[in-house]
Image (spheres, helix red, strand yellow):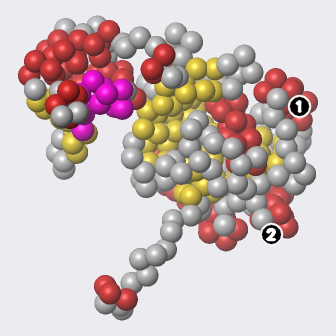
């Protein structure tokens, strides 16, 4: 027991990616098939191994172990040629599924994790995909108890023992939610959901226990690498333009996305409108529209307030 004045308040959190991932965490990257989640994971590996920003966020460089149950060494080589990624010695390691059986986290893969951590001081492991791993037991991904006992307890144990952060790649179901038991979302430090907007743009929705929720608007370049859309170079979405005029008129409003689209007769879903707001916060502020997300025990709504930018210059 310590009095408050003796607590060490100089401790700095060790992050893997500032604002997105902390060390020793368990994270999940989910998307529909063929959206590009494996390419995004490889992009993340390149950022960490080569000390580069990831989608504008600073990284804490580390070696990366990429465990694949789907792509082969040849497919990996092809993807590296497309993206142009190169790695210095002992900064990127690759393990692929044996042709005879799944990679087992309790024997062969466990030895790889031990060597990666102790010999090469690696701290970040990508599992592509989560359901392709043999966990040593018959595991029903739709069963909460199985997910907890057979999968996540083991990952937590390994993260603590070997100072590792795991990114588990997984699928969305037909309803756009994480496939399987609710225990998957509940046991992650963060969920990164990659959404194909069907208009050559993507949204990366980041929900996190340790950082603020974020929605990143992305495009893919000719190397199939994801990039942040520069909002200053694109026309403001029509729905946001209508919303902006409404807030300027009302001065201040409290609302949910569903209430706002009903009030303004917007041709957009509530979830899509919410993502638009979250990903355009800074751009709206330039026009004097300040949007805050209010969470209470029983509700979740937004508050928007207009402050004329000209008055701020006085």
Disc 1: which residue: 77
Is residue 213 depicted above or below 119 in this figure? above
Q: Residue at x 71, y 22 (%)?
A: 224
Q: Is residue 172 visible?
A: no
Q: Give the left or right position of residue 220, taking residue 270 as reference.
A: right
Is residue 160 depicted above or below 177 in this figure? below
Q: Nearer the viewer, residue 53 or 20?
A: 53
Quadrant location of residue 159? bottom right
Q: Which residues are magenta?
A: 281-292
In the displayed image of the protein, which residue is found farthest to the left? 250
Circle 2 residues within 10 Å: few <14, some 14–19, many ≥20: few
Residue 118 numbered tag: 2
Q: Give the left or right position of residue 11, taking residue 238 as reference.
A: right
- Give how far across and how far down residue 126 sits, in percent: 70, 46
Residue 177 numbered tag: none
- Give how far across and how far down residue 122 sits, in percent: 76, 60
Q: Nearer the viewer, residue 210 or 304?
A: 304
């Amino acid at each position: 027991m310590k009095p408050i004045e003796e607590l060490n308040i100089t401790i700095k959190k060790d992050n893997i990616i500032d604002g997105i991932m902390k060390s020793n965490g368990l994270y999940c990257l989910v998307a529909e098939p063929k959206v590009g989640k494996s390419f995004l994971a490889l992009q993340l590996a390149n950022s960490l191994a080569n000390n580069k920003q990831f989608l504008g966020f600073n990284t804490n460089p580390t070696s990366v172990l990429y465990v694949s149950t789907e792509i082969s060494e040849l497919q990996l080589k092809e993807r590296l040629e497309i993206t142009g990624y190169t790695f210095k010695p002992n900064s990127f390691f690759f393990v692929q599924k044996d042709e005879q059986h799944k990679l087992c986290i309790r024997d062969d893969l466990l030895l790889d994790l031990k060597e990666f951590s102790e010999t090469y001081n690696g701290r970040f492991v990508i599992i592509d995909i989560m359901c392709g791993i043999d966990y040593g037991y018959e595991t029903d991904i739709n069963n909460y108890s199985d997910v907890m006992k057979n999968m996540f307890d083991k990952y937590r144990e390994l993260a603590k023992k070997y100072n590792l952060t795991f990114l588990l790649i997984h699928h969305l179901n037909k309803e756009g939610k994480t496939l399987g038991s609710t225990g998957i979302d509940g046991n992650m430090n963060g969920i990164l959901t990659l959404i194909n907007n069907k208009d050559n743009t993507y949204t990366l929705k980041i929900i996190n226990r340790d950082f603020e929720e974020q929605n990143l608007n992305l495009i893919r370049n000719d190397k199939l690498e994801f990039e942040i859309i520069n909002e200053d170079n694109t026309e403001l979405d029509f729905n946001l333009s209508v919303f902006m005029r409404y807030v300027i008129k009302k001065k201040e409003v409290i609302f949910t996305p569903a209430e706002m689209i009903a009030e303004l007769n917007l041709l957009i879903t509530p979830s899509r409108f919410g993502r638009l707001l979250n990903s355009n916060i800074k751009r709206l502020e330039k026009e004097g529209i300040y949007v805050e997300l209010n969470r209470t025990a029983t509700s979740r709504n937004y508050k928007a307030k207009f402050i004329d930018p000209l008055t701020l210059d006085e």
